[in-house]
Image: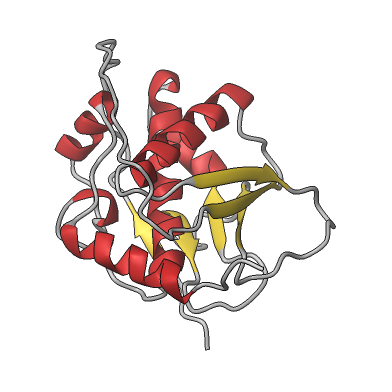
Amino acid sequence: MNRTWTLTLVTGLALASIGTAHAFYAPKPHAGTRSVTVYLLQSGLAVPVAVLARAELVATKIFASVGVPVEWHTRRAGGNSMDAAEAIEMQFDSGLPAPFHEGAFAYAMPYGTGGTRIHVFSDRVLRVSPDELSGSFLGHVMAHEITHVLEGISRHSAEGVMKEHWSIHDFYEMGFRPLPFAIEDIGLIHAGLLRRKPEH
């Protein structure tokens, strides 16, 4: 049976825009590490192109920091299903009733073996932060849920990307640079990648 885990965050925060540029140096992918392929499907309110592009960049940097490359693709509604062992499908939903996963911005089904394993409530995400920070916030949400699927277990860490509840300080840090992974998550991510289907 699949278990659903939600990412709940503090809402109603006013975040200041931070214009300072920061260099990013990503390590090379680990030897033998496969890239992670993510297929995106939008349903209902579409995420603005600029916001989604920024979110993909942020999530890519988060995974690059631990030597894991990510490839992003768009899938049309009704398109062919992907091999669950080969790719992760993420759907952006909107307009769902407030009681549905109340307080959550996304949820993942890490024990799933097919179909859409990540749902992001795009309207809730876009409401939680100023426009200039929406992409960074969404990128962290996406990275958090992708990590649940890669690790293949339902757990959270005390710090970083995989915290169950991000603090005001965490939101502030997102404006400067991507949040890091906890040491235990790095090991779990790479162990999960080793379990994935090998290249043909």
Q: Is residue 173 above or below residue 33?
A: above
Q: Can residue 39 be seen in this snapshot?
A: yes
Q: Quadrant of the C terminus?
A: bottom right
* Numbered circles on residues, count: 0
Most distant residue in the top direction: 19
- Residue 44 in percent (x, y) is at 71, 44
Side of 13 where 69 appears, left or right: right
At a point 30% along the width and 68% down the height, the residue shown is 188
At a point 43% along the width and 29% down the height, the residue shown is 134
Q: Viewer-proximal residue, 108 or 32? A: 32
Most distant residue in the front direction: 31
Which coloring applies here? secondary structure
Side of 115 where 137 appears, left or right: left
Q: Is residue 29 above or below residue 191?
A: above
- Residue 26 in percent (x, y) is at 32, 35
Q: Viewer-proximal residue, 123 or 137? A: 137
- Residue 55 in percent (x, y) is at 48, 34
Q: Viewer-proximal residue, 189 or 166? A: 189
Q: Viewer-proximal residue, 80 or 171? A: 80
- Residue 116 in percent (x, y) is at 64, 65
Q: Can residue 5 be seen in this snapshot?
A: no
Q: Is residue 19 above or below residue 148?
A: above
At a point 27% along the width and 20% down the height, the residue shown is 23
At a point 59% along the width and 52% down the height, the residue shown is 38
Side of 97 where 171 appears, left or right: left
